[in-house]
Image (spheres, grey):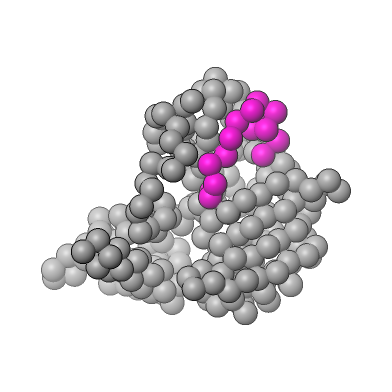
Amino acid sequence: MRSATFTVTWPKEFSHPIDHYFHEADDASLQCIRYATPSPDGQFIQFVEVSGDPGRARELLEACPEVVEYAVVETAGNAIAYMQSEAGTLAEALLLSGTERELIVDWPVHYLDDRWGLRVRLAGDLAAMQASAADLPDEVSFQLERIGQFRPEGDDFGSPLTDRQRQLLAVAEREGYYSVPRETTQAELAELLDLAPATLSERLQRIEANLARGYLESG
């Protein structure tokens, strides 16, 4: 079985309203979708990983009219939000098109830091993946990152960082944030990534903590 990893991006107006609520918040952000599925009553159910203040995440979910029911469970790392909401047309199209063509989503699906969109890994027939992409609106863009044999454990099994964290780390390194002497400030990096400084600081701290933990545990 083949797998393909790609980014799918779209204009802001195609995003689900709850994405807008979190995008504008400085103290909570959506990291990845652990699982999503349509419900029998035509709504959409998701388990979403949230970083930042869990209390703030509850406030944002409560404020969004399209969210019908929710719960936030705090974990040792990020919080997990259960969310039942009115489904957006794009979310329905992405999920239903893949299901109809017997494609398997390799969860989790990661939000992109610098654009409205997701990084997705699918398993199945490559021709079916291309056909599913063709079903989506013209405003939706796809960028293929890699193709290979599907491995259930994932290509990055054992990595201490998520795909989204690796993206952020790559940008920080490219801009010289970790150079000696440092070539950019955290404020400049936050502006480049369109993030609040406090949000960027929190994400970098998580990345550095995960790398340090992974290094120590490796012996």
The image shows residue 140, relative to residue 185, as above or below, that is above
191 relative position to 219: left or right:
right
Q: Is residue 28 visible?
A: no
Residue at the image point whose x is 47% and y is 26% from the top: 2
The image shows residue 102, relative to residue 160, as above or below, that is above
Q: Is residue 56 visible?
A: yes
Quick one: which residue is furthest to the left in this view? 180
14 relative position to 105: left or right:
right
Q: Find residue 70 and report its horizontal and vertical position in percent.
A: 73, 66
Of the pair 3 and 89, the residue shown nearer to us: 3
Q: Write down the quadrant of residue 102 in the picture.
A: top right
Residue at the image point whose x is 41% and y is 29% from the top: 149
Q: Find residue 124 and report its horizontal and vertical position in percent.
A: 54, 27
31 relative position to 13: left or right:
left
Q: Find residue 145 and report its horizontal and vertical position in percent.
A: 40, 36
Q: Write down the quadrant of residue 168 in the picture.
A: bottom left
Residue at the image point whose x is 45% and y is 67% from the top: 195
Q: Which stretch appears magenta?
A: 95-109
Residue 31 counted in the magenta span: no
Quick one: which residue is furthest to the top in this view? 127
Quick one: which residue is furthest to the right in this view? 41
Residue at the image point whose x is 59% and y is 47% from the top: 11
The image shows residue 112, relative to residue 53, as above or below, that is above
Quadrant of the drawing holding the C terminus = bottom left
7 relative position to 24: left or right:
left
Q: Find residue 53 and report its horizontal and vertical position in percent.
A: 55, 77
